[in-house]
Image (cartoon, rainbow, N blue to C red):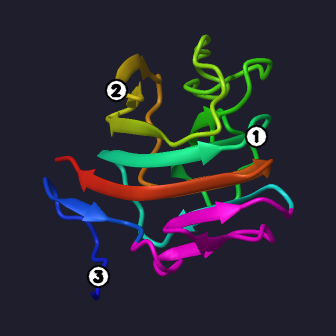
Amino acid sequence: MFLLVLPAMAGEWVTLFDGKSLKGWTNQGDANWSVKGGAMTADTGKVCLLTTKDKYENYELELEFKAAIGTNSGVFLNTEAKVKNEAVDCYEINIAPPGNPFPTGSIVKHHKVEGQGEKDEWRSYKLKVLDGSITITLDGQKLLKHTVAKPRPAGLIGLQKNEGRISFRKIRVKKLD
């Protein structure tokens, strides 16, 4: 079966990962991103992002992730290819242990969420960015809606490899008007 990945049109869900290749994604560093078992996975290399080729401003993003215990990773929204400051260059939705200053479900340097724990199993994020308002739903539970004073312009979607093994699958986006 051949899957064509096209830029998202407003109101339509578009698949960003075909389950077989890294087509449509750019490795912004030296992490060992590869496709294993229908998921994009990295477990070695320096901290880096795997980013979309297209930019997005207002959208909904759905994906599943699996993080080994102790893993520090994240999903970067409206991001630059190279992030110097998470408070300014992106919205980083963290995937991290409870002891991290911004554990899983938090927006790094913006809003801390506690109590989501760690699980070495598939979990789901539903993320929405609309005019500087970020809504995070984890495993079907709405965790927060946070609005920033100065919304980020259109940017890339990034998947982070920081520490530990991380996998992502079932990634799709829907642009919002």
Name the residue at 78% across, 59% down: 43
Disc with the residue nearer the chain's start (1 vs 3): 3
Label annotation for residue 71: 1
Disc with the residue nearer the chain's start (1 vs 2): 1
Query: Badge 3: few (under 14), some or many (20 or more) residues near its Cα, within 10 Å?
Result: few
Name the residue at 55% across, 25% down: 105
Q: Amino acid at mark 2?
A: Gly
> Does residue 62 appear left or right of residue 43 in this picture?
left
In this orientation, which residue lies closer to the viewer: 126 or 167?
Answer: 167
Q: CA distance from mark 1 to mark 3?
A: 31 Å
> Does residue 72 appear left or right of residue 128 in this picture?
right
Magenta stretch: helix, strand or loop mostly = loop
Name the residue at 31% across, 77% down: 5
Q: Amino acid at mark 3?
A: Leu
Circle 3: element type: loop
Q: Position of residue 136 (x, y in %)?
A: 42, 28
**Residue at mark 2:** 140
In this orientation, which residue lies closer to the viewer: 8 or 94?
Answer: 94
Q: CA distance from mark 3 to mark 2?
A: 27 Å
> Does residue 166 appear left or right of residue 173 in this picture?
right
- Res. 52 visible in picture: yes
Q: Amino acid at mark 1?
A: Thr
**Residue at mark 3:** 3
Q: CA distance from mark 1 to mark 2?
A: 22 Å
Report the residue that reaches farthest toward the left: 11
Numbered range of the magenta stretch = 18-45
Name the residue at 37% across, 20% down: 141
